[in-house]
Amino acid sequence: MRERFLQIYTAVLADILDARGKHEQTLPPSIRPLRLGTRLAGPAYTVSGRPAQPDSYDVALRKVLTMLGDVPAGQVAVYSCGQEVAAHLGELSVTSLAARGVEGCVLDGGCRDIRSILEEDFPVFCSHVTPADSTWRWELEATQVAVTVGQVWIDPGDWVVGDDDGVVVVPQRLAESVLAEAEEKAATESEIRAAVRGGASPLEAYERYGTF
Protein backbone atom coordinates (compact mmCIF):
# COMPACT_ATOMS: atom_id res chain seq x y z
CA MET A 1 0.00 0.00 0.00
CA ARG A 2 2.88 2.37 0.66
CA GLU A 3 4.01 2.30 -2.97
CA ARG A 4 0.45 2.91 -4.13
CA PHE A 5 -0.02 5.84 -1.73
CA LEU A 6 3.25 7.36 -2.95
CA GLN A 7 1.79 7.52 -6.46
CA ILE A 8 -1.25 9.52 -5.29
CA TYR A 9 -1.08 13.24 -4.60
CA THR A 10 -2.50 14.49 -1.33
CA ALA A 11 -5.08 16.77 -2.97
CA VAL A 12 -6.91 13.74 -4.38
CA LEU A 13 -6.94 12.07 -0.96
CA ALA A 14 -8.23 15.26 0.67
CA ASP A 15 -11.03 15.52 -1.92
CA ILE A 16 -12.15 11.94 -1.35
CA LEU A 17 -12.10 12.30 2.42
CA ASP A 18 -14.07 15.57 2.15
CA ALA A 19 -16.69 13.80 0.01
CA ARG A 20 -17.04 11.18 2.74
CA GLY A 21 -17.64 13.83 5.37
CA LYS A 22 -14.11 13.61 6.78
CA HIS A 23 -13.32 17.33 6.68
CA GLU A 24 -10.55 17.40 9.31
CA GLN A 25 -7.92 15.08 7.81
CA THR A 26 -5.36 17.61 6.52
CA LEU A 27 -2.63 18.75 8.90
CA PRO A 28 -2.08 22.51 9.45
CA PRO A 29 -0.53 24.26 6.43
CA SER A 30 2.38 25.35 8.63
CA ILE A 31 3.64 21.75 8.51
CA ARG A 32 5.84 21.71 5.41
CA PRO A 33 8.48 19.42 3.92
CA LEU A 34 12.06 20.43 4.61
CA ARG A 35 12.74 19.91 0.90
CA LEU A 36 10.33 20.45 -1.98
CA GLY A 37 9.73 17.23 -3.86
CA THR A 38 9.60 15.16 -0.69
CA ARG A 39 7.02 12.37 -0.67
CA LEU A 40 6.12 10.26 2.34
CA ALA A 41 3.64 7.48 3.12
CA GLY A 42 3.29 4.98 5.94
CA PRO A 43 1.33 3.97 9.01
CA ALA A 44 1.60 6.38 11.94
CA TYR A 45 3.71 5.64 15.00
CA THR A 46 2.39 8.34 17.31
CA VAL A 47 4.38 10.37 19.82
CA SER A 48 2.76 12.70 22.36
CA GLY A 49 4.55 15.37 24.39
CA ARG A 50 4.08 18.73 26.05
CA PRO A 51 6.01 21.90 26.89
CA ALA A 52 7.86 21.43 30.18
CA GLN A 53 11.01 22.25 32.11
CA PRO A 54 12.30 18.82 33.14
CA ASP A 55 14.18 18.55 36.40
CA SER A 56 16.66 16.15 34.83
CA TYR A 57 18.15 16.53 31.36
CA ASP A 58 19.30 12.91 31.50
CA VAL A 59 15.85 11.51 32.33
CA ALA A 60 14.14 13.63 29.67
CA LEU A 61 16.67 12.67 27.01
CA ARG A 62 16.47 8.96 27.84
CA LYS A 63 12.71 9.00 27.21
CA VAL A 64 13.25 10.40 23.73
CA LEU A 65 16.11 8.02 22.93
CA THR A 66 13.99 5.05 23.99
CA MET A 67 11.19 6.24 21.73
CA LEU A 68 13.54 6.65 18.76
CA GLY A 69 14.64 3.05 19.20
CA ASP A 70 11.05 1.81 19.31
CA VAL A 71 9.70 3.22 16.03
CA PRO A 72 9.30 0.22 13.69
CA ALA A 73 10.68 0.05 10.19
CA GLY A 74 8.13 0.98 7.56
CA GLN A 75 6.23 3.42 9.76
CA VAL A 76 6.13 7.22 10.03
CA ALA A 77 6.91 8.88 13.38
CA VAL A 78 4.16 11.44 14.02
CA TYR A 79 4.89 13.87 16.87
CA SER A 80 2.21 15.92 18.59
CA CYS A 81 4.48 18.51 20.21
CA GLY A 82 2.20 21.44 20.95
CA GLN A 83 5.19 23.77 20.99
CA GLU A 84 6.65 26.41 18.67
CA VAL A 85 9.93 27.31 20.42
CA ALA A 86 12.17 24.25 20.23
CA ALA A 87 13.64 21.64 17.88
CA HIS A 88 12.18 18.22 18.61
CA LEU A 89 14.13 16.47 15.85
CA GLY A 90 17.79 16.75 14.88
CA GLU A 91 20.54 15.08 12.89
CA LEU A 92 21.28 12.17 15.23
CA SER A 93 17.59 11.39 15.72
CA VAL A 94 17.09 11.31 11.96
CA THR A 95 20.20 9.19 11.43
CA SER A 96 18.87 6.66 13.94
CA LEU A 97 15.41 6.52 12.39
CA ALA A 98 16.72 6.27 8.84
CA ALA A 99 19.21 3.53 9.71
CA ARG A 100 16.39 1.36 11.01
CA GLY A 101 14.12 1.75 8.01
CA VAL A 102 11.61 4.28 9.37
CA GLU A 103 9.81 5.97 6.47
CA GLY A 104 9.89 9.54 7.76
CA CYS A 105 8.79 11.96 10.45
CA VAL A 106 5.90 14.44 10.68
CA LEU A 107 5.68 16.86 13.59
CA ASP A 108 3.90 20.03 14.67
CA GLY A 109 7.22 21.06 16.17
CA GLY A 110 10.69 22.06 15.12
CA CYS A 111 13.82 20.67 13.53
CA ARG A 112 17.48 21.61 13.62
CA ASP A 113 20.67 20.40 11.87
CA ILE A 114 18.80 20.94 8.62
CA ARG A 115 21.76 20.59 6.27
CA SER A 116 22.65 17.19 7.72
CA ILE A 117 19.02 16.01 7.62
CA LEU A 118 18.78 16.99 3.97
CA GLU A 119 22.00 15.12 3.23
CA GLU A 120 20.46 12.05 4.90
CA ASP A 121 17.56 12.35 2.42
CA PHE A 122 15.08 11.37 5.13
CA PRO A 123 11.52 12.68 4.66
CA VAL A 124 10.68 15.28 7.33
CA PHE A 125 7.63 17.54 7.55
CA CYS A 126 7.72 20.09 10.38
CA SER A 127 6.30 23.46 11.38
CA HIS A 128 9.49 25.42 12.09
CA VAL A 129 13.27 25.39 12.25
CA THR A 130 15.31 26.53 15.25
CA PRO A 131 18.66 25.67 16.89
CA ALA A 132 17.03 25.51 20.37
CA ASP A 133 17.09 21.97 21.83
CA SER A 134 13.78 20.62 23.13
CA THR A 135 15.27 18.61 26.02
CA TRP A 136 15.15 21.54 28.47
CA ARG A 137 11.83 22.80 27.11
CA TRP A 138 9.63 19.79 26.36
CA GLU A 139 8.98 16.26 27.56
CA LEU A 140 7.74 13.11 25.92
CA GLU A 141 4.60 11.76 27.57
CA ALA A 142 3.51 8.68 25.60
CA THR A 143 3.80 6.73 22.37
CA GLN A 144 1.26 4.76 20.36
CA VAL A 145 -1.69 6.70 21.73
CA ALA A 146 -4.25 8.79 19.85
CA VAL A 147 -2.89 12.30 19.23
CA THR A 148 -4.24 15.51 17.76
CA VAL A 149 -2.27 17.67 15.34
CA GLY A 150 -4.14 20.83 14.50
CA GLN A 151 -7.73 19.62 14.14
CA VAL A 152 -6.73 16.13 13.00
CA TRP A 153 -7.22 13.11 15.23
CA ILE A 154 -4.53 10.48 14.53
CA ASP A 155 -4.65 6.92 15.80
CA PRO A 156 -1.63 4.60 15.67
CA GLY A 157 -1.69 2.84 12.31
CA ASP A 158 -3.56 5.55 10.41
CA TRP A 159 -1.95 6.23 7.04
CA VAL A 160 0.07 9.44 6.79
CA VAL A 161 0.71 10.74 3.27
CA GLY A 162 2.77 13.84 2.48
CA ASP A 163 3.92 15.78 -0.57
CA ASP A 164 4.58 19.40 -1.55
CA ASP A 165 0.97 20.37 -0.77
CA GLY A 166 1.13 19.12 2.83
CA VAL A 167 0.10 16.07 4.85
CA VAL A 168 -3.17 14.10 4.83
CA VAL A 169 -4.15 11.44 7.37
CA VAL A 170 -6.27 8.52 6.15
CA PRO A 171 -7.98 6.53 8.94
CA GLN A 172 -6.70 2.97 8.93
CA ARG A 173 -10.15 1.42 8.53
CA LEU A 174 -10.75 3.49 5.39
CA ALA A 175 -7.28 3.23 3.89
CA GLU A 176 -7.88 0.52 1.29
CA SER A 177 -11.15 1.94 -0.02
CA VAL A 178 -9.88 5.54 -0.04
CA LEU A 179 -6.74 4.48 -1.87
CA ALA A 180 -8.69 2.58 -4.52
CA GLU A 181 -11.02 5.55 -5.04
CA ALA A 182 -8.04 7.92 -5.20
CA GLU A 183 -6.41 5.82 -7.92
CA GLU A 184 -9.64 5.92 -9.93
CA LYS A 185 -10.02 9.68 -9.45
CA ALA A 186 -6.40 10.34 -10.43
CA ALA A 187 -6.94 8.40 -13.67
CA THR A 188 -10.10 10.40 -14.37
CA GLU A 189 -8.27 13.66 -13.74
CA SER A 190 -5.71 12.66 -16.35
CA GLU A 191 -8.58 12.34 -18.83
CA ILE A 192 -9.97 15.71 -17.76
CA ARG A 193 -6.56 17.30 -18.23
CA ALA A 194 -6.35 15.92 -21.77
CA ALA A 195 -9.90 17.08 -22.54
CA VAL A 196 -9.24 20.64 -21.33
CA ARG A 197 -6.01 20.80 -23.29
CA GLY A 198 -8.00 19.62 -26.30
CA GLY A 199 -10.37 22.57 -26.03
CA ALA A 200 -13.13 21.46 -23.66
CA SER A 201 -14.32 24.16 -21.28
CA PRO A 202 -14.02 23.53 -17.54
CA LEU A 203 -17.82 23.20 -17.24
CA GLU A 204 -17.98 20.80 -20.19
CA ALA A 205 -15.26 18.67 -18.63
CA TYR A 206 -17.06 18.65 -15.28
CA GLU A 207 -20.36 17.63 -16.87
CA ARG A 208 -18.64 14.89 -18.86
CA TYR A 209 -16.59 13.40 -16.02
CA GLY A 210 -18.50 14.43 -12.89
CA THR A 211 -15.45 15.97 -11.22
CA PHE A 212 -12.89 18.72 -11.76
Image: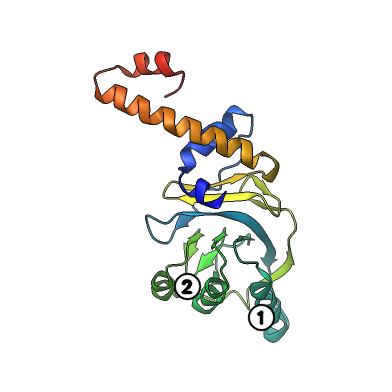
What residue is shown at x 43% (from left), y 46% (from top)?
165
Q: Where is residue 40 in the image (x, y as percent from the top left)?
A: 50, 55
Q: Is mark 1 on a helix, strand or loop?
A: helix
Q: Where is residue 5 in the image (x, y as percent from the top left)?
A: 52, 46
Q: In which quarter of the image is residue 9?
A: top left
The amino acid sitting under disc 2 is Arg
Q: How crowded is mark 2: few (under 14 residues within 10 Å), some or many (20 or more)?
A: some
The total number of labels drawn is 2
Q: Position of residue 194 (x, y in %)?
A: 30, 27
- Write down the residue under mark 2: 112
Question: Residue shown at 48%/43% (left/top)?
Answer: 10
Q: For numbered disc 2, what is the local secondary structure?
A: loop
Residue nearer the viewer, 39 or 52: 39
Residue at the spot 56% in from the left edge and 43% down from the top edge: 26
Task: Give above or below for 4 relative to 92.
Answer: above
Location of residue 4 with respect to 74 vertically, above or below: above
Tell me the amino acid under the disc marked 1: Leu
Q: Which label's residue is closer to the chain start, 1 or 2?
A: 1
Residue 25 sits in quarter: top right
Q: Residue at x 40, y 69 (%)?
A: 118
Q: Is residue 70 left or right of residue 200?
A: right
Q: Which of 32 and 42 is in front in this view?
A: 42
Q: In this view, does 191 lie to the left or right of 70?
A: left
Q: In this view, does 72 lie to the left or right of 93?
A: right
- Residue tagged by mark 1? 61
